[in-house]
Amino acid sequence: ERCGVVSANGSSPLENMRGLEHYLNDIMSPQSNTTDMKGFINTTMFPTLQLHGKSHYFPNLEDQAGPVLLEEPSHLVDNTLGTQPLSSPSRSSPHSQGSEGGERFSRKVFVGGLPPDIDEDEITVSFRRFGPLVVDWPHKAESKSYFPPKGYAFLLFQDENSVQSLIDACITDEDKLYLCVSSPTIKDKPVQIRPWRLSDADFVLDASMPLDPRKTVFVGGVPRPLKAVELAMIMDRLYGGVCYAGIDTDPELKYPKGAGRVAFSNQQSYIAAISARFVQLQHGDIDKRVEVKPYVLDDQMCDECQGQRCGGKFAPFFCANVTCLQYYCEHCWATIHSRPGREFHKPLVKEGADRPRAVPFRWC
């Protein structure tokens, strides 16, 4: 899908989309008729977009290599932010009204602080009144255990309306949701219910700037409670110039997968972020060091030969070193990186159907 910034008169390239990454290259030049102030969204600029379990601005998120948070420790039950507030009323997501069909929440819900002796059947009974569901937790199939090993589980509801019913039944305390469940030895224990709101997957901080894939970074290992607005504020506070942040979600349940994207409005901020290589994400009790690297496209021509030396094929290599920051075909990579000072550069690779798998270069 192709999504992005369109002109203030409502015209949109979404009608003729063939892929976001092609479109992003078409909008690398700033829009002259965009007058929105930073932090405000002009609704004419963002027509109704549909959530398909991925970031609208950067589909194919799951194709990018990077660490993914597989487990959600029980200490993540506390969903408070750090000492510095990361959101403000003046900033919002362009998808705040939910996706097509009125969906507002992922059908996958985190529940934490469960009694230690509660098993899968008892969890199912506790939440079955809200609708058909499956209870899951990381490595459940491999462990063959009937008890969530770390005091938390995921509720996978068949219908999104069940999530709303669950929320309505919860008790709210300091912006957190709780519901009482019982186990054989503990009666009416409050457990935290943490639904994922679909609108939290995308956030535009500066709608006046076009999204440039060559000023976009991939953030791996993003804690699942982190919202796009919070990721945007953290990165903007560290490097400045953030215009968009997105959280990668799985296509089926639309729940965070543990990765994200951040687009910058200027080259200086982009280079500062990728030069750091890692960033400390602080969110409530979370203080996690995660990887930051360039967002690699798979449909770029070689910046050196423009396809003349590689038969017009897309460039398989991207050099993330700040002295390069270019896409290369195999021939041009070997030529450019045989020069003194560049022989130790490492290529970032996003393999496509016609990409060679064995290459005579050191992989990152």
Image (cartoon, helix red, strand yellow):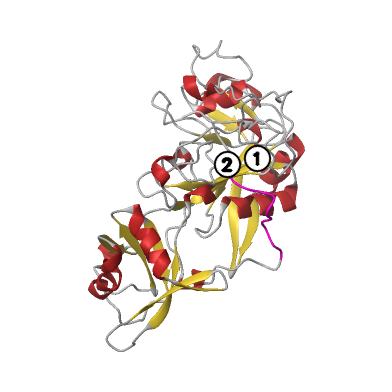
Up-down relation of residue 335 to residue 207 (above or below): above
Q: Nearer the viewer, residue 302 or 98?
A: 98
Q: Is residue 202 magenta?
A: no
Label number found at residue 314: none
Furthest-bottom residue in this view: 185
Does residue 24 appear to the left or right of 63 in the view shown? right
55 vs 207, nearest the viewer:
207
| Mark 2 or mark 1, earlier in chain | 1
Residues rendered magenta in the picture:
84-93
Residue 138 in view, yes or no: no
Q: Residue 94 has which mark?
A: 2
Secondary structure type for disc 1: loop
Task: Tell me what residue is drawn at x 42 percent, y 58 percent.
Answer: 70
Callout 2–callout 1 Cβ contact below 8 Å: yes
Query: Disc 1 marks which amino acid?
Result: Ile
> What residue does disc 1 label?
41
Residue at x 68%, y 54% (from the top left corner)? 89
What residue is shown at x 55% (from left), y 57% (from top)? 226
